[in-house]
Image (tube, coloured by chain):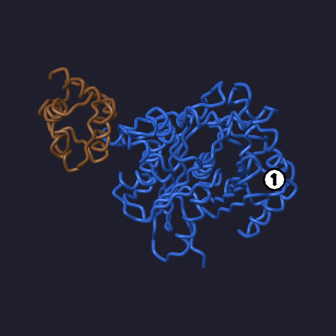
Chain colours: A brown, B blue
Amino acid sequence: MINLQTELKESIIEQLNLEDMEPADIGNDEPLFGDGLGLDSIDALELIVLLEKDYGIKLTDPAQSREIFVSINKMAEFIEANRTK
Amino acid sequence: MKAKIYINGISSISAQNLDSEANPVSYHKTIFPAISPNYKEFIKPMALRRMSKAIKMGITSAKVALSEAKIEIPDAIITGTGEGCKQDTERFLENLLDQDEELLSPTSFIQSTHNTIGGQIALNLGCKNYNVTYTQNSASLESAFLDAEMQLLETSENKSVLVGGVDELSEKITQFKSLDGQLKSVDIHNLDLLKEDSPGTITSEGSHFFTLSTEKNNNSYAEFKDVSIKNSIQPEKINEEVEIFLIKNNINAAAIDAVIFGNNGDNRYDHYYKNLQQNLFKNTTQLAYKHLVGDYDTVSGFALYSACKILKNGRIPSIMNLNSSTPKKLKNILIYNQYLGRDHSLILLSAV
């Protein structure tokens, strides 16, 4: 689980061009959107693509992403339960 | 009476360092990049991270031009770009191939359109006013100025319009210019460009923005008198065409104190400039600039930027001189540009 969280942080930093950030700068329970990391709606689209590309998870209901992309821990839990690769 | 248009703010990002006119940057390449300012001074890091160079250059130079004119929100944002956001277009197309047309990253697609630059400037400023982008090859910036001119001349109120031109390099699409002979076949020193007698030119990237207003202020650089675009002109008619433009503006060639030509070292098309240099403007101070910043669709923004500075400071950087003529005064400057014998444009400025 810890490895998956670090892997996720590395993928997010790379995919979302979070220059000058290290995985250690992102807290596992820190909110990804809003006051936390400050991601926006375009980032949410990038995260949906990331889930499908890296873990074979296709989100069919966009509203689902609100619950999944809350934090790194929430994303990791969802991936562990639903990954196909 | 026709309203007057003043240029109250200017900004340039190019392959030259603006602080070192006496020591121009020398390149030994056919393609060289613009020198980046510290974008973080103008754009928040979270917004900056996904921007291509065209967007970064556009927002930064737009903000400088507005700040010079002490304008926060312009009444219009009008952008010219010949090839738009090529870096994101390229990224998107590569992504399309790599991913077998599936699972595409949305960011590069969203930002690949030509009007992304103008849109991002508006988002950054929080400006919901008129916002249009013109893409007309090497007359893109001039098309934006035509729109601005019409908007400002039709109003009786004091209005400010932000007008600019942006083009960026990209790894592969820019290289295509080599394939159809637009670039020199071997690397040359940019500062020797105008001594070349061979086909093709050198290219680069840049962004130039200008704040135009119907009222002049203490910072005004010049009066923007007129702009004209002609897609096609027969080589033997170029003197006549320029005279027609001058007559329309109640001025003659003798009253032009300096002409900024777009000579780009391409011996297939520089005859348009040479014809004017040897005839209509043979006794006029002749200047050039593409040996400094390369040639690209909106590079005439550098000529306009230079003309504004010359008119305000009353001094011509010697690196721009094409002949030894020295103007008695610096009141009127004409800018003439064309690319590959097409998209001929004229811009007339006058000192304030």
Question: Residue sitting at 38 percent across and 44 percent down?
Answer: B106
Q: Residue furthest bottom?
A: B1
- Viewer-nearest residue: A64 or B155: A64
Letter of the chain that mark 1 sits on in the rendering: B
Q: Quadrant of the N terminus of chain B?
A: bottom right
* Residue bearing the label numbered 1: B281
Q: Residue furthest top?
A: A3
Q: Is residue B243 above or below residue B45?
A: below
- Viewer-nearest residue: B118 or B212: B118
- For numbered disc 1, what is the local secondary structure? loop
Q: Where is residue A11 shown, x and y percent of the image?
A: 29, 28
Q: Is residue B1 above or below residue B233?
A: below
User: Image check: B173 left or right of B112?
Assistant: right
Q: Where is residue A25 shown, x and y percent of the image?
A: 20, 27
Q: Where is residue B283 shown, x and y percent of the image?
A: 83, 50
The three-letter amino acid code for the residue at tag 1 is Phe
Q: Residue furthest left?
A: A29
Q: Quadrant of the C terminus of chain B?
A: bottom right
- Viewer-nearest residue: A31 or B120: A31
Q: Quadrant of residue B239?
A: bottom right
Question: Residue sitting at 63 percent across and 47 percent down?
Answer: B297
Q: Is residue B287 above or below residue B1?
A: above
Q: Quadrant of residue B322?
A: top right
